[in-house]
Image (cartoon, helix red, strand yellow):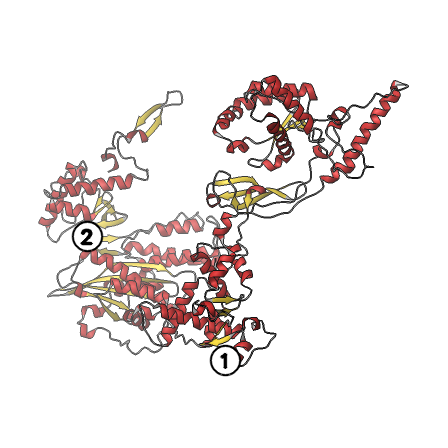
């Protein structure tokens, strides 16, 4: 069938294969022009073409179109009719329709040779003879055209093959039974397979002895399956009834359907189909399993009714337990969730059908739920023909009243909430008060429930009454003594925390007395309600006012609240609410900090000036300034060569990461593009490699890692801006001023300058370059007796420099600062509300164990950032109000 469907030329290149006849032959490429078997889309494409062909030819071949749309299973057609002439017409129309579409029919077989007399022998299905039976294979079933009956065969595995989970599953799956006619046999195999699964055996592991014994007994029963024959034809007319049965056991449950036709001379009853499932491994009650079986019955019945479409008045459903019948008859909302969900579906599928009770011994579905042997279904007419009462009149059917079943299980408990004032207190004390307005609406509903008033919405007066009720209960809890005395018109204790407010009682609420009672303010503003600062409701009230007033500040928010409420120690809780407001925080983010890490070895070990450098000596803080005409590779390498020539060859160069320049203006960014190209980096690395210099970069977007040279750049800019001003200088003039600025920067003190006149001069970077400060006034020459004595004096002076460098300068580097955590990624190019949120996935501690670089996961990926570029959100301390 697949090879009859052509593929569009545009899609054919996707179906290429490579082929050669031998290993020496050249490889040739072929394109598959038709639908290829084995691809995932092939079944859909072929079936869709078949259905589309039926729809396109529906006017010319109405019967053939209907049969094609209904009775095809992939490329197999199984259909029929009540008369030979009708079957011949079906054959003619379907064959003509499909031939026109390029699907010629073959392998015809029929239970009446008159139907296929005109079919060539080559196009007929091959008849296989087995003993005294002949059959053809149809959809995995064996059908005897001469007897018009289905039958089955079973061939056990080779004797040498040991039983394993794999081999047992293979044998069970080989029993292809789409209609479920052998379900009582197959369900025993399903139960056995479930036992194997619970043992958690490997696929090729030998099974335990008890399972082996059960499997051998099951195989012996299956050997007799060849003797079972089931008639294909089931008579139907307008009097046909459908009877569906359901039953369950602790191991399995199932359903089966029978067709009963009441003709003039005889009444026939035959099995139509069945379905079974093993019970779940998680143990549930038997009534629940019975309900699952009933739902399986409803689903199977829906499929059958859609095919046969008989008179809906002749459909009857049967089940054993009266509990299940009570569940189905009752309203779903009466039962627990498990029962209610299934009852709802059963009622939807079987609303037009009649439900009956059947005793277990008369229920054929009992064989499905428990399983049986081949002899058990061959010798028992209950399975293939159904119970005998189906052939009798309805007055002789089993009857059982399920109206008086006591204590039906799975009833949903009806809870009636009786709310007392104490329970209102408990709710009001709840720390999970989320929203001020929502809290008031809930309490208003409670008040309406107590007063038996139904309202679709509430008036402002009712909301105000609820607010007063909540405030009254809070005052009674927090100001118990004061409330009692004021309620009885007594003075409160002078040591009370409310004494300074001159409180009084108004409508059972404590209000502020004060001295503005004669003002023109409103009553609430003159006498606000007193509330404690520590109650969760008060916190929700302040949060509500903060948000509705556009995130007002502390002073403004206090002034707004004082129009109606006087909150004790209000500023404390107001500051807490504002601090925990995420929106407010995002406008004032605080970047994380960490204590300064231990300085690298190059900063604290005596060495030659500029041995480790970024044009700033790591050891002595000496600065070297150079003029570069541009940022080209040639100019940069020339500048580096001049630096080495004047200061000596360095060992390590440390520089910024290129991403630090992202905030530069447009012109500078264009200039920097050439500086960060791969060609530039390769040429610089090659030069450094040849000179024996190591080049290191600081983390991206972390200029504070280069604080040593950033401070030097800042100081150099300070002098250059003031010296140059608005003047336009020539190269020589600019070079002169740059050298002077370099001398000034290198004359800055490395140690604090004391006001004590007895202290030595401060140590500067110039002392390590020329032996004295660069801008010091020259001293007169001292005559020396010998050259050796002069050399020793110079050596002594240099040693004194390094001694002061270790004792004074290194001690200044010992100072550190604070530490914090993070959540927002700081981005100088975006406003704070646009900063990306992230979660820390990893930390990068330094050699001292302190974290200064973290990995942050955001929606756009994972980034590595210094902690100075991240801001901690106040999540841990956020109250439930947020």
Residue 416 drawn at (x, y percent): 39, 75
Asked if residue 102 lies left or right of residue 621, the reply is: left
- Quadrant housing residue 341: bottom left
| Residue drawn at point x = 70 percent, y = 34 percent | 603
Residue 72, can we see it?
Answer: yes
Q: Is residue 631 above or below residue 384?
A: above
Dot 2 corresponds to which residue?
148
The local crowd at label 1, few if under 14, some if 14 to 19, many if 20 or more residues have their Cα within 10 Å, is some
Residue 836 drawn at (x, y percent): 48, 44
Asked if residue 505 lies left or right of residue 154, the reply is: right
Q: Nearer the viewer, mark 1 or mark 2?
A: 1
Residue 89 drawn at (x, y percent): 10, 46
Total labels: the figure holds 2
Residue 212, can we see it?
Answer: no
Q: Secondary structure at mark 2?
A: loop
Of the pair 831 and 351, the residue shown nearer to us? 831
Q: Secondary structure at mark 1?
A: helix
Classify the position of the N terminus by image quarter. Answer: top left
Give the Cα separation between the discs numbered 1 and 2: 98 Å
The local crowd at label 2, few if under 14, some if 14 to 19, many if 20 or more residues have their Cα within 10 Å, is some
Q: Earlier in the sequence, mark 1 or mark 2?
A: 2
Asked if residue 316 lies left or right of residue 514, the reply is: left
Q: Is residue 159 above or below residue 730?
A: below
Of the pair 143 and 239, the residue shown nearer to us? 239
Dot 1 corresponds to which residue?
487
Q: Is residue 64 above or below residue 467?
A: above
Q: Is residue 718 above or below residue 463?
A: above
């Amino acid at each position: 069938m697949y090879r009859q469907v052509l593929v569009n030329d545009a899609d054919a290149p996707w179906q290429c294969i490579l082929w050669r006849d031998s290993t020496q032959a050249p490889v040739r490429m072929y394109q598959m022009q038709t639908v290829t078997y084995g691809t995932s889309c092939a079944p859909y494409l072929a079936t869709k073409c078949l259905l589309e062909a039926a729809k396109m030819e529906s006017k010319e071949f109405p019967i053939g179109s209907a049969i094609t749309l209904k009775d095809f299973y992939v490329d197999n057609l199984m259909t029929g009719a009540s008369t030979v002439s009708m079957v011949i017409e079906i054959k003619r129309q379907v064959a003509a329709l499909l031939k026109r579409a390029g699907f010629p029919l073959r392998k015809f077989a029929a239970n009446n040779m008159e139907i296929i007399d005109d079919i060539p022998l080559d196009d007929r299905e091959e008849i296989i003879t087995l003993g005294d039976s002949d059959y053809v294979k149809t959809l995995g079933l064996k059908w005897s055209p001469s007897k018009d009956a289905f039958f089955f065969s079973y061939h056990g595995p080779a004797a040498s093959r040991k039983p394993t989970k794999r081999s047992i599953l293979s044998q069970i799956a080989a029993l292809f039974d789409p209609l479920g006619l052998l379900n009582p046999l197959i369900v025993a195999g399903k139960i056995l397979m479930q036992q194997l699964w619970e043992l958690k055996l490997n696929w090729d592991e030998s099974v335990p002895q008890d399972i082996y014994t059960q499997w051998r007994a099951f195989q012996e029963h299956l050997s007799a399956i060849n003797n079972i024959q089931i008639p294909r034809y089931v008579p139907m007319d307008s009097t046909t009834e459908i009877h569906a049965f359901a039953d369950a056991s602790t191991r399995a449950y199932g359903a089966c359907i029978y067709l009963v036709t009441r003709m003039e001379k005889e009444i026939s009853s035959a099995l139509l189909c069945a379905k079974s499932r093993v019970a779940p491994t998680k143990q549930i009650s038997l009534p629940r399993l019975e309900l699952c079986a009933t739902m399986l019955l409803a689903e199977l019945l829906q499929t059958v009714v859609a095919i046969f479409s008989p008179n809906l008045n002749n459909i009857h459903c049967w089940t054993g337990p009266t509990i299940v019948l009570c569940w189905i008859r009752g309203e779903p909302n009466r039962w627990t969730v498990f029962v209610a969900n299934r009852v709802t579906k059963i009622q939807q599928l079987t609303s037009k059908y009649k439900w009956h009770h059947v005793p277990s011994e008369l229920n054929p579905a009992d064989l499905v739920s428990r399983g049986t042997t081949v002899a058990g279904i061959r010798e028992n007419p209950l399975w293939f023909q159904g119970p005998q009462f189906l052939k009798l009149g309805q007055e002789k059917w089993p009857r059982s009243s399920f109206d008086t079943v006591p204590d039906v299980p799975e009833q949903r408990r009806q809870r009636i909430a009786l709310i007392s004032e104490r329970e209102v207190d408990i709710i009001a004390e709840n720390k999970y008060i989320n929203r001020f307005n929502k809290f008031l609406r809930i309490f208003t509903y409670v008040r309406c429930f107590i007063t038996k008033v139904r309202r679709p919405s509430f008036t402002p007066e009712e909301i105000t009454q609820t607010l007063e009720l909540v405030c009254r209960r809070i005052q009674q809890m927090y100001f118990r003594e004061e409330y009692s005395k004021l309620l009885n018109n007594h003075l409160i204790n002078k040591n009370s925390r409310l004494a300074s407010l001159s409180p009084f009682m108004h409508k059972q609420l404590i209000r502020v007395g004060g001295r503005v009672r004669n003002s023109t303010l409103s009553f609430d503003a003159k006498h606000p309600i007193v509330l404690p600062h520590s109650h969760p409701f008060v916190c929700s009230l302040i949060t509500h006012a903060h948000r509705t007033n556009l995130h007002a500040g502390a002073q403004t928010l206090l002034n707004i609240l004082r129009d109606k409420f006087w909150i004790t120690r209000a500023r404390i809780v107001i500051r807490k609410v504002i601090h925990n407001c995420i929106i407010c925080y995002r406008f004032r983010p605080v970047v994380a900090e960490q204590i300064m890490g231990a300085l690298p070895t190059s900063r604290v070990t005596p060495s030659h000036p500029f041995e480790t450098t970024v044009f700033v000596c790591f050891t002595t803080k000496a600065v070297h300034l150079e003029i570069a005409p541009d940022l080209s590779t040639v100019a940069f390498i020339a500048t580096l060569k001049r630096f080495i020539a004047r200061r000596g060859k360095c060992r390590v160069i440390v520089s910024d990461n290129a991403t630090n320049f992202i905030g530069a203006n447009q012109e500078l960014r264009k200039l920097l593009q050439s500086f960060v190209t791969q060609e530039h980096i390769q040429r610089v690395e090659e030069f450094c490699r040849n000179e024996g210099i190591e080049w290191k970069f600081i983390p991206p977007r972390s200029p504070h890692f280069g604080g040593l040279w950033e401070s030097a750049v800042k100081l150099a800019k300070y002098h250059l801006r003031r010296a140059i001003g608005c003047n336009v200088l020539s190269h020589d003039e600019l070079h002169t001023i740059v050298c002077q600025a370099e001398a000034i920067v290198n004359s800055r003190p490395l140690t604090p300058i004391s006001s004590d006149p007895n202290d030595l001069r401060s140590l500067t970077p110039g002392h390590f370059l020329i032996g004295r400060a660069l801008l010091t006034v020259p001293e007169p020459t001292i005559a020396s007796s010998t050259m050796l004595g002069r050399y020793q004096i110079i050596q002594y002076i240099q040693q004194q420099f390094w001694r002061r460098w270790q004792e004074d300068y290194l001690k200044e580097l010992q100072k550190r600062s604070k530490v914090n955590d993070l959540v927002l990624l700081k981005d100088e190019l975006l406003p704070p509300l646009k900063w990306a949120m992230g979660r820390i996935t990893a930390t990068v501690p330094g050699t001292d164990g302190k974290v200064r670089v973290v990995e942050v996961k955001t929606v756009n990926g994972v980034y590595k950032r210094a902690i100075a570029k991240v801001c901690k959100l106040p999540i841990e301390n956020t109250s439930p109000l947020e």
